[in-house]
Image: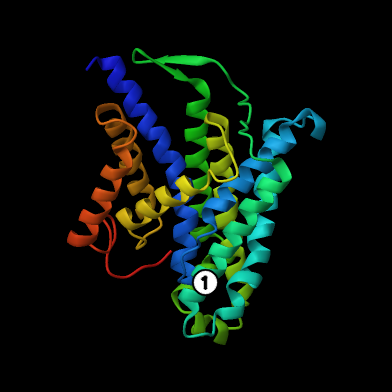
Amino acid sequence: MAFDTFMFILMSGILLGGLYALMATGLAVVWTTLGVFNFAHGAFVTLGAYVAWQVTQPVAGGFGFMIAVLMSVTVMFCLGFVLHFALIKPFERNQNVVLLAVISTLAAASIIENGVLLTWGPRDKQITPPIGSRINFFGASINAFDFVILAVALLALFALALFLRRTTMGRTLRAAAQNREAAELMGLDVPRLFAITLGISAATAALAGIFVGSLRFINPSFGADPLMKSLIVVILGGVARFTSPIYAAFVVGIAESFSAYFLGLYWSPALLFAMMIAVLLIKPEGLFGHRSKTL
């Protein structure tokens, strides 16, 4: 293998890792805080991409890529906040809350996907990236916007980590995640905190969807693949620490990039699932996890 080819595959894997980290971290935060798996996460990725695509269209005023990002992230945060009270809160005192949350989030995913289909139609669309130039990186020609995506993804994750660990709101959210009963006894508005958590998850999913939508075509059902990759990343890395799914995301991204080159696109998902099953058998808490979990 030529060195420039190796660098291209490696950088492609790192870029995928940044996108998967955005997707999986939002999913892991909900899983850790609310104790449920959000099957609507992939639909959040889809809807966020479509909202940004609509804003960037000339009929919407041509506000530009940055405005589209801000509007999409804001809209998806508000949607996630509201959906908590519709999808999860009504069942949180039920002993079958996990099963009911699975059903309600699957229903929400179907509703969102069909809503996107009715609103924007079935034809593929793509968000026009703001940068089209290419950079010669150690002999490999790489799109300059790929570096922007990676930088923004890492910056967003760093900002989220600072929010959770350094702000009053973030610390109260972590407290509610660790011990809901104690948080309620201290007077914290736990339902509102959990709604903020789902809003943050939806916002990170929207940001990932925008970036994916600028790299490839999107359609109403394209959120299924991000949901699957997020699940693999979360299981592979674990949710013990905030950074666990981030590390795992880059492992998955690089592994997928090299396997797609050597084995082909059709065998790449099989390799990722094999890695996930192996980790579940050997280290069920994840490669970067331990038995306890916390934000």
* Residue name at image x 72 percent, y 30 percent: 64
Front residue of 58 and 152: 58
Front residue of 25 and 175: 25
Q: Quadrant of residue 295?
A: bottom left
* Residue name at image x 35 percent, y 54 percent: 244
Q: Position of residue 240 (x, y in %)?
A: 34, 63
Q: Mark 1 points at which residue?
A: 101
In the picture provided, is 293 more to the left or to the right than 93?
Answer: left
Q: Of helix, strand and loop, which one carries label 1? A: helix
Q: Is residue 188 visible?
A: no
In the picture provided, is 272 more to the left or to the right than 119?
Answer: left
* Residue name at image x 53 percent, y 31 percent: 216
As drawn, 67 above or below 194: above
Mark 1 is on which residue type? Ala
In the picture provided, is 265 more to the left or to the right than 224?
Answer: left
Tell me the quadrant of the picture where the N terminus can be found: top left
Q: Position of residue 152 (x, y in %)?
A: 53, 37
Front residue of 260 and 135: 260
Q: In which quarter of the image is residue 124?
A: top right
Q: How crowded is mark 1: few (under 14 residues within 10 Å), some or many (20 or more)?
A: many
In the picture provided, is 259 more to the left or to the right than 79?
Answer: left
As drawn, 45 above or below 105: above
Q: Is residue 77 visible?
A: yes
